[in-house]
Image (tube, rainbow, N blue to C red):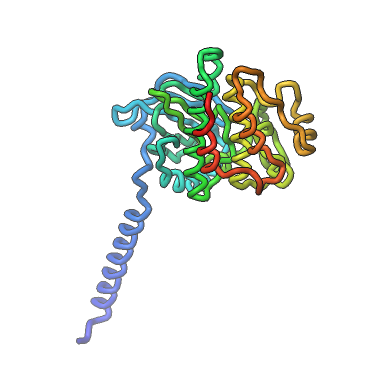
Amino acid sequence: MWIGGCSLCCFLKSTIISFVLLTLSIMQTVSADPWEITRSSIKLGRRLGEGFFGVVYQGLYNNTPVAVKTLRHGTMDPRDFLKEAQIMKTMEHPNLIQLLAVCTEEPIYIITELMKNGSLLDYLKVRVGRLHLNDQIEMAAQVASGMAYLEMKKYIHRDLAARNVLVGENNVYKVADFGLARVLQAPPNQTNLYYIPVGKAIFPLRWTAPEAIANEKFTIKCDVWSFGILLYEIMTFGEMPYPDMNNSQVKQRVPNGYRMPRPVDPYCSQDMYKIMLDCWNGNKNDRPTFEALKMSLRNVRG
């Protein structure tokens, strides 16, 4: 059937507009992220703490108490964070902190479940002499369980330390900040007790495996090394690793074979110290898996 030039033009124009509108609708549906929330949906409460990359607040989201990590401008590329957030959303384990929502407008908000007893580092420091070895073994075993899950998923934490383990009620311990360490960048003109620049990257030197410092490449075996340092923190009630050494000495001596001595009795058994040394094996391939560490810790007796 013949259609006049004007009619054909109007027909094509209408068809094109309908196609564009349908395409935009589909794109909007596909790109919609159920984890994304508006800043107005979060009510910030008291300040819980401040780290190198931002401030953590207690907040209220859907009438539920939550933790809100606010990231300083310039500490990460939002595109990198979105990639990591996608992975974080797939992580579900009783010993990993649960991501609840994100707000990707800068400054970025990361909303997680609230752990009422704060960081393991602070928790340890106020309980010197009040915990038994079995309590400390339980902390370590739960962290190892969470890390074994990451290991199974072929994922790397990169910043495992007592400050990044959170304590809930009923002696529950959860690894936090997994997925963030690889995308965070050092804020300009800032210094910190834990992180130092190495090349173009920034590392928690005292927790980082020597090979990662040397080549700036991480594997799950680097996390195993860090877990050994975390065990030292647990056994010393939050003492800074390598307490008698400055950063330059740590960077020079550890790759050459120096290892921290066993913490003073009665807080650290020989069995626990052996697990630490296994984690600090100079050959990364000879370090245990987190699954093996979880089993070893269950067999340690206080």
Quadrant of the image for the N terminus?
Answer: bottom left
Identify the image quadrant of residue 45.
top left
Q: Position of residue 92 (x, y in %)?
A: 40, 42
On the picture, is 19 further left or further right than 207? left
Q: Position of residue 143 (x, y in %)?
A: 50, 34
Q: Position of residue 42 (x, y in %)?
A: 36, 30
Which residue sits furthest left? 1
On the picture, is 15 further left or further right than 114? left
Residue nearest the observer in this picture, 65 or 134? 134
Q: Is residue 203 visible?
A: no
Residue 44, above or below 216: above
* Residue positioned 64% across, 29% down in the render: 273
Residue nearest the observer in this picture, 135 or 23? 135
Which residue sits furthest bottom? 1
On the picture, is 13 further left or further right than 286? left
Q: Is residue 163 visible?
A: yes
* Residue positioned 38% across, 42% down in the render: 36
* Residue positioned 51% across, 39% down in the render: 295
Q: Position of residue 187 (x, y in %)?
A: 62, 33
Identify the image quadrant of residue 169.
top left
Residue nearest the observer in this picture, 276 or 88? 276
Residue nearest the observer in this picture, 60 or 167? 167
Q: How many numbered dots are placed on residues in this image?
A: 0
* Residue positioned 63% across, 46% down in the render: 218
